[in-house]
Image: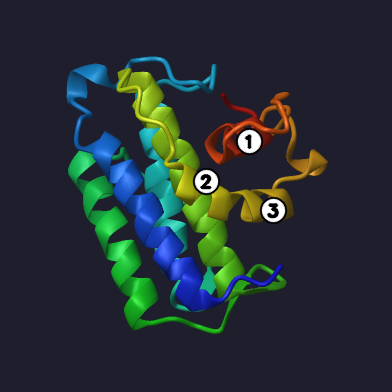
């Protein structure tokens, strides 16, 4: 599967919109709330999201440093980075992105960013108890990205085991099951 950069950026836009709808509801008193990831509370999830947003924005320059950023996440910082991420990919799109020794097509990397952002957006919504699901249209377009980028080697370290769902399950359930959620 090759994801065209233009389509991937549009997918990223929709994933950011879904995730921002949860981030605007986060308040400092909720940072200790549990998330679907047993080892992370909402504060730890936001720290991870903050670091990932930095990496995906950095990728728009054509290369990603493998050194994580330090510091505690701030909600306003994460919200601002989510908005800036889209702008970078619209204004400064490289053809390929170097990550260590690997060179990835930009469309695939942006698709992976959309998957990561949507998945953690769902985690935020779950932690807050909003009941907001991943829209099926978004999930349907992210599912091929997930099938390509999340495999057995990623489990159990980056993703939980795939969860069983009926073949006729809606795209949102299929997507979440593939990334070990639901």
Nearest-to-viewer mark from 3 and 1: 1
As rendered, which of 72 and 29 lies closer to the eye?
Answer: 29
How far apart are labels 2 and 3 at the CA level? Answer: 15 Å
- Tell me the number on the disc at residue 174: 1
Residue shown at 34% from the left, 15% from the top: 33
Given residues 13 and 110, the one toward you in this image is 13
Find residue 32 and report its image quarter. Answer: top left
| Other residues around mark 2 within 10 Å, as few (<14) / some (14–19) / many (≥20) | many
Q: Any mark on residue 149, and which?
A: 3
Q: Are marks 2 and 1 in contact (CB under 8 Å)?
A: yes
Name the element at disc 1.
helix
Q: Which mark is residue 10?
A: none
Looking at the figure, which quarter contains the N terminus? bottom right
Q: Residue furthest right?
A: 152
Mark 2 / mark 1, whichever is N-terminal: 2
Question: Does residue 74 show up?
Answer: no
């Amino acid at each position: 599967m090759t994801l065209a950069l233009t389509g991937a950026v549009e997918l990223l836009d929709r994933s950011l919109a879904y995730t921002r709808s949860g981030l605007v509801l986060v308040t400092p008193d909720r940072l200790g709330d549990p998330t679907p990831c047993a080892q992370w509370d909402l504060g730890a999830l936001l720290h991870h999201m903050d670091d990932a947003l930095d990496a995906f924005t950095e990728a728009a320059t054509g290369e990603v440093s493998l050194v994580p950023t330090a510091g505690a996440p701030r909600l306003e910082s994460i919200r601002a980075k989510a908005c800036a991420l889209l702008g970078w990919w619209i204004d400064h799109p490289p053809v390929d992105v170097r990550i260590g020794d690997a060179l990835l097509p930009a469309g695939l990397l942006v698709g992976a960013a959309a998957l990561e952002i949507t998945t953690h957006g769902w985690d935020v919504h779950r932690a807050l108890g909003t009941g907001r699901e991943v829209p099926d249209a978004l999930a349907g377009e992210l599912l091929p990205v997930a099938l390509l980028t999340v495999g057995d080697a990623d489990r159990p370290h980056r993703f939980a085991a795939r969860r069983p769902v009926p073949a006729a399950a809606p795209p949102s359930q299929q997507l979440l099951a593939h990334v070990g959620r639901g």
